[in-house]
Image (cartoon, rainbow, N blue to C red):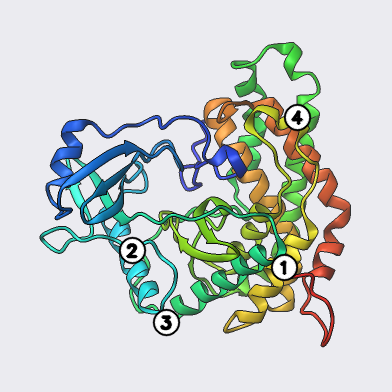
Amino acid sequence: MSIEPDNIDTTHRLGPLAQEGSVAEEISGRDLAIVLSRYDLGSVDRISDYKRGSRRSPKMHIVSSMGEFLLKRRATGHDEYSRVMFAHSVQAMLAEHRFPVAGLVSTTEESTLVQHEGRIYELFRFITGNRFDKSNPAASEAGRVLAHFHSILLNLKDDPVVGDGIFHHSKQIPEVLGSLSSVLSTHEKSTELEGIDDTIAYIREQYKISAEKVQKLEWNSLAPQIVHGDWHPGNMLYDDTEIIAVIDFDSLRFQPRVTDVANGALQFSMRMGTAQSVESWGEGFRGHTIQSLVQAYDQFSQIPLFPSERAMIPDLMVEALIVEGVIPIWKTGSFGSVKGSTFLRLIEKKLKWLEPKMQRVIDVIQPPLSGEDSFA
């Protein structure tokens, strides 16, 4: 039976691997000239490749007499016209409420996108900022800004036009995990795959356990709303510990808000290194980062998290880690430039660190008592 989990986004998002390597797609000189002719940018002084983010969504940094800009071509699969326009309406609403967005630039015809040869292009103001510094105040800021994001969009009247992928309780993930061994065997030597079946079996069991636990916590009673869908450090620009821009709205979803909170807790807290030294990455997560982000979200949210939502967070972190790790490996045999077997063993190591600490995570993300040090 063929497995084709098209409803699960396959973009690499885990740490430096989310932005590693060169951009696979490029914007040709001809396409660039045609697209830029639709904008009034004054005299262009310099254009250069901007090799960050998804390699399927090429970007160009443009410096002109009118300022600095970032031209982006939407990745295939994220370029449905109605979906892009909905994302633009979300960004416009956020900007009206002083939310930190980069700012879309309109064409001379007052459009926020350009369609050229079947592809969609967007132009943004270029924002210069710093990346997440792993401090507790910066993690708290990520929680505060996420709460602001959710609160603003509770009032969005437009019908959502978003992707439908979700990392929780996917029926396809067990099937994908069941086929991973054969996928890896076509990309790696048998000596490199010793013990990998046990690793895959462990990952599969942890996904099943966590998905079932979340379901029992009345998941189906949670109201869906517009969520960011990709709340990770690579999409935030900081000035010291203040977020000055959230820079990617390609993965908007209509889901319970706790999916954003749990994914943010995972992405901001993971102990990592470089793509060249995955074997030496730390085994766990930064507990104070999880605490700072979630407690700040609670403090600034229009509706604080329900106890059932807090209880779901560590298991949703498990599900998100597994889905975002195994799908790219199933598709390509690797995770970016990292061998698939190497990254699966990393997932196993992190799950084994987290498994006995699930209740501890729930305990530390409770609202702080009056006068209690929240470590934020």
- Placement of the N terminus among the 4 image quadrants: top right
Tag 3's secondary structure? loop
Residues at marks 2 and 3 touching, judged by CB atoms closer than 8 Å:
no
Label ID, residue 311: none
Chain-order first, disc 4 or disc 3: 3
Chain-order first, disc 1 or disc 2: 2
Q: Quadrant of residue 266?
A: bottom right
Check disc 1 and give the amino acid type: Ser
- Residue 148 or residue 348, whichever sits in front: 148
Is 2 situated left or right of 262 in this image? left
Is 200 situated left or right of 179 in this image? right
Residues at marks 1 and 3 touching, judged by CB atoms closer than 8 Å:
no
Bin the neighbour count of mark 2 within 10 Å (Cα to Cα): few under 14, some 14-19, many 20 and up: some
Residues at marks 4 and 1 touching, judged by CB atoms closer than 8 Å:
no
Bin the neighbour count of mark 1 within 10 Å (Cα to Cα): few under 14, some 14-19, many 20 and up: many
Label ID, residue 279: 4
Provide residue 26's location: percent of width, then percent of height: 31, 32
Provide residue 243's location: percent of width, then percent of height: 53, 65
Is 245 situated left or right of 168 in this image? left
Label ID, residue 292: 1
Chain-order first, disc 2 or disc 4: 2
Q: Which residue is mark 3?
A: 155
> Given this view, does label 2 or label 3 mark the residue nearer the observer?
2
Label ID, residue 103: 2
- Label 4 to label 3: alpha-carbon separation: 45 Å
- Label 4 to label 1: alpha-carbon separation: 28 Å
Residue at 46% over, 56% down: 164
Tag 2's secondary structure? loop
Q: Is residue 157 above or below residue 259?
A: below
> Given this view, does label 1 or label 3 mark the residue nearer the observer?
1
- Label 2 to label 3: alpha-carbon separation: 21 Å
- Label 1 to label 3: alpha-carbon separation: 27 Å
